[in-house]
Image (cartoon, rainbow, N blue to C red):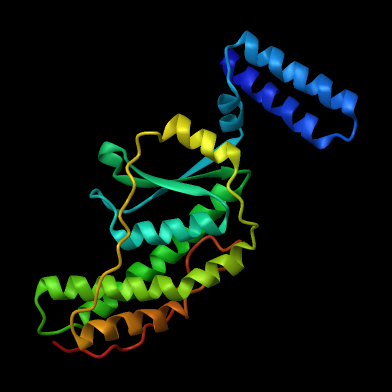
């Protein structure tokens, strides 16, 4: 606990040093930060990482999230100048862990939750209308639908966030401290094999253009679902 308080104080000293126009005040604040770091054996990475806030969002699955879930989480994280990793918490299942400065991680998680709810619902409805298909074909088309949906919604998330994009040293320090062993996820796109596969992506893009994001709305809206054609 004493070390946590020292981290907090050192972070405030660094912020004060950066925010003042007085060279004397800046030197004093930096000297105080350095004294705390030396006393509690802290390095710069420890202090920078202390300014990062993490926000966890339940993936809704006990198995590893799908590629399209990772893509959607990544788009939301990037839009709010955050980063994201996925972690499994045994009985609690998988979570996406957004981390960023200030409220950015919470906003990224909020955007993901809203969009995930809408995508799952529309994807499920689309797959249900794929009649006379093998299970593997339904899954592939469902993934192609999700891929098109996310392509369409990407710019909408950027506009909703309105955040400047800059890789923060604090995020890199937090990543090195907490997620150094995290494996990189292969986000390879699904390839269409037949004409109806290509249509699945088209339907997904069309549905994605109707996705909704609203600030301050606690629950995702329920858009009406179109009828998608079927085929082998």
On screen, residue 86 versus residue 209, left or right, reads left
| Residue found at the very far top of the displayed protein | 39
Residue at the image position 26 percent from the left and 37 percent from the top: 90
Q: Quadrant of residue 124?
A: bottom left
Can I make out residue 221 in this image? no
Q: Is residue 108 visible?
A: yes
For residue 184, side relative to residue 134 (left or right): right
Q: How many marks?
A: 0
Residue 131 coordinates in the image, percent (x, y): 14, 84
Residue 41, placed above or below residue 120: above
* Residue sitting at x 27%, y 52%: 61
| Quadrant (top left/top right/bottom left/bottom right) for the N terminus | top right
* Among the 4 quarters of the image, the one containing residue 182: top left
Is residue 22 placed above or below 76 in the rendered structure? above
- Most foreground residue, 6 or 197: 197
What x and y, as percent, mark residue 224?
Answer: 41, 82
The front one of 165 and 137 is: 165
Residue at horizontal 11 percent and vertical 81 percent from the top: 133
On screen, residue 209 versus residue 192, left or right, reads right
Residue 41 placement: quadrant: top right
Question: What residue is shown at x 13% (from left), y 87% (from top)?
Answer: 232
The picture places residue 47, in percent across and down from the top left corner, at 61, 26
Question: Where does the image place residue 186, in percent across and percent down from the top left?
Answer: 30, 55
């Amino acid at each position: 606990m004493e070390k946590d308080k020292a981290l907090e104080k050192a972070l405030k000293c660094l912020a004060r040093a950066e925010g003042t126009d007085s060279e004397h005040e800046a030197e004093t604040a930096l000297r105080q930060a350095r004294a705390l770091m030396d006393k509690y054996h802290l390095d710069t990475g420890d202090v920078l990482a202390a300014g990062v806030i993490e926000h966890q969002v339940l993936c809704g699955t006990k198995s590893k999230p799908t590629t399209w879930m990772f893509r959607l989480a990544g788009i939301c994280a990037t839009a709010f100048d955050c980063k994201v990793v996925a972690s499994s918490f045994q009985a609690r299942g998988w979570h996406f862990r957004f981390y960023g400065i200030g409220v950015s991680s919470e906003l990224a998680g909020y955007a993901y939750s809203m969009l995930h709810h809408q995508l799952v619902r529309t994807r499920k409805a689309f797959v249900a209308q794929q009649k006379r298909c093998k299970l593997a074909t339904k899954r592939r088309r469902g993934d192609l639908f999700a891929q098109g949906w996310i392509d369409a919604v990407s710019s909408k998330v950027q506009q909703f966030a309105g955040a400047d994009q800059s890789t923060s040293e604090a995020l890199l320090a937090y990543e090195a401290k907490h997620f150094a062993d995290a494996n990189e996820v292969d986000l390879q796109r699904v390839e269409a094999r037949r004409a109806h596969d290509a249509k699945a992506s088209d339907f997904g893009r069309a549905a994605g253009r109707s996705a909704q994001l609203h600030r301050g709305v606690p629950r995702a809206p329920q858009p009406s679902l179109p009828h998608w054609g079927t085929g082998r």
